[in-house]
Amino acid sequence: FLLARASVCLARLRNIEVIEIISTVIEHLVKGEVMQMKSDLRGPDAFEYYLRKNYYKTGSLIANSVLACTVLGGHSKETQEIAFQFGESIGHAFQLVDDALDFE
């Protein structure tokens, strides 16, 4: 229900770029959850897989949400990129702390 309501509100913005950004977030959330379900990867690629999964689960949500705000605010491409990188970093930090708390 909440996703449906959010989608209606998003459509009412009538900003195709922002709609595409948020649609990508939804795709990434699903992809991240699928990656987590089959995350028995071991070996040299395990950490890269973990970081990519974290990006899809959390980093993309925060990074693209901040990006969408800068697009709606009419900021420059440079500001949009900086905002995206900031959101991505916050997302990684959040997910790392969240995962570490699972070991307590």
Image (tube, rainbow, N blue to C red):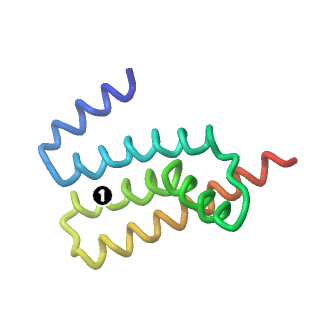
- For the view shown, which residue lies furthest in the bottom direction? 78
- Give the residue pinned by disc 1: 69
Q: Quadrant of residue 7?
A: top left
Q: Is residue 104 above or below residue 64?
A: above
Nearer to the camera, 68 or 24: 24
- For the view shown, which residue lies furthest in the right direction? 104
> Which x, y percent locates residue 67?
33, 61
Q: Who's the residue at 23% across and 30% down the image?
A: 8
Left or right placement of residue 55 versus residue 70 in this view: right
Left or right placement of residue 101 versus residue 58 in this view: right
> Which x, y percent locates residue 44?
69, 68
- Secondary structure at badge 1 equals helix
Amino acid type assigned to the residue bearing label 1 in the image: Cys
Q: Who's the residue at 66% across and 64% down the image?
A: 47
Q: Quadrant of residue 42?
A: bottom right
For the image shown, how many numbered marks are present on the structure?
A: 1
Q: Who's the residue at 39% across and 26% down the image?
A: 2
> Which x, y percent locates residue 73?
22, 62
Left or right placement of residue 49 versus residue 6 in this view: right
Q: Is residue 63 above or below residue 33?
A: below
Left or right placement of residue 101 versus residue 70 in this view: right
- For the view shown, which residue lies furthest in the left direction? 14
Q: In which quarter of the image is residue 72?
A: bottom left
Nearer to the camera, 64 or 73: 64
Q: In which quadrant is the N terminus drawn?
A: top left
- For the view shown, which residue lies furthest in the front direction? 43
> Which x, y percent locates residue 17?
18, 54
Q: Who's the residue at 14% across and 49% down the image?
A: 15
Q: Is residue 102 above or below residue 75?
A: above
